[in-house]
Image (cartoon, rainbow, N blue to C red):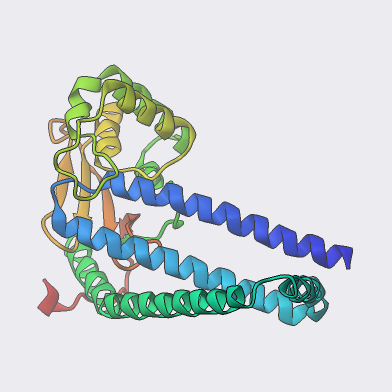
Amino acid sequence: MEDIKRDHQRILRRHRREKKELEDQIQSMKRSVPKGDREQRKQLRLNIARLQAELEQRHLRELEKFQEKFPSSHALDSLAQNLAKLNLENRHPHSSKARRRRERREAEEREEQERALAAELEPLEDFRKEEEARLVAILAARGLEMKALPLDSQCMFRAVQDQLPFVATVDGLRRRVADYMRRHVDDFLPFFNTDDDDDDEEEPLTREDFLAHCEHVARLRPWGGQLELRALSHVLRRPMEVVQAAGPALLLGEQYRCKPVTLVYVQYACSLGEHYNSVQPLRAGAPAPAPRLL
């Protein structure tokens, strides 16, 4: 029984940690989207809602699976329910009715939110397929294909690391980026965004805010965005090219005359939302791109 209880507590601790990690990821995703781009902000809100819903559903499935595996784990829940029933004897009769009404109203609100979220997310599968086909076509025209990388907050730095002709660690790249941005605050501060979606009248962020962000980049491994990618181009003295399905490739550090590091920006194809992959030469026998998507 004690082992089962410890396993249950371990699952709950992991769930709390994953929720905190998702919160950090969401803050980094917000920073990566230009404040004035309302279309991307709208898509960002959809991505955030999807991530939160997927995490909550996965946690519920894990707890249900645990309870199926260890039915005796219901004992603690049964004890709590019995104590709750005993407490009802000392309550005013109207309090139980009010509680039931409140719980019913909350359940209806949750169901309404789930229906609205499902309606918003329904078109995303088509977006994923179209985005993947477009990226395959764009890269194949260059003799390249996408190289998948782990889905985490290190993906942008890993995509750069993967293509460097010398050995570098992701943490080392982060530290160099943070140091460069600290030394060139005035070049980056005007483009440093807040996490707020629609407040166009807020006060601009301060130098201290940006320096705190640099410390965050170096130590806490947040998701990288355009600021960090631009700093990488200067640190490595190489252009950074971002291939995307929605428009022309973005080129940063074009003043450096050498072969660019090419990253693939994926907006819909990953369950975590926005993501960066690397590229590699197109392998023989790889499927040809669909001409209609070029």
Is 94 above or below relative to 211? below
Quadrant holding the N terminus: bottom right
Indicate the position of residue 97 as horizontal and vertical percent values.
56, 79
Quadrant holding the C terminus: bottom left
Residue projecting furthest to the right: 1
Is 217 above or below relative to 115? above
Is 55 above or below relative to 196? below
The residue depicted at 24 percent of the width and 41 percent of the height is: 226
* Residue 221 makes an appearance in the image: yes
Indicate the position of residue 215 as horizontal and vertical percent values.
42, 27
The residue depicted at 27 percent of the width and 31 percent of the height is: 231
Q: Nearer the viewer, residue 183 or 160?
A: 183
The residue depicted at 40 percent of the width and 75 percent of the height is: 109
The answer to which quarter of the image holds residue 236 is top left
* Residue 282 makes an appearance in the image: no
The residue depicted at 11 percent of the width and 79 percent of the height is: 292
Q: Is residue 114 left or right of 263 when viewed as pictured?
A: right
Indicate the position of residue 248 as horizontal and vertical percent values.
11, 56
Indicate the position of residue 138 as horizontal and vertical percent values.
18, 64
Q: Is residue 174 left or right of 11 when viewed as pictured?
A: left
Residue projecting furthest to the top: 183
Q: Is residue 258 left or right of 46 when viewed as pictured?
A: left
The answer to which quarter of the image holds residue 264 is bottom left
Number of numbered discs: 0
Q: Nearer the viewer, residue 4 or 86?
A: 86
Q: Nearer the viewer, residue 165 or 273?
A: 273
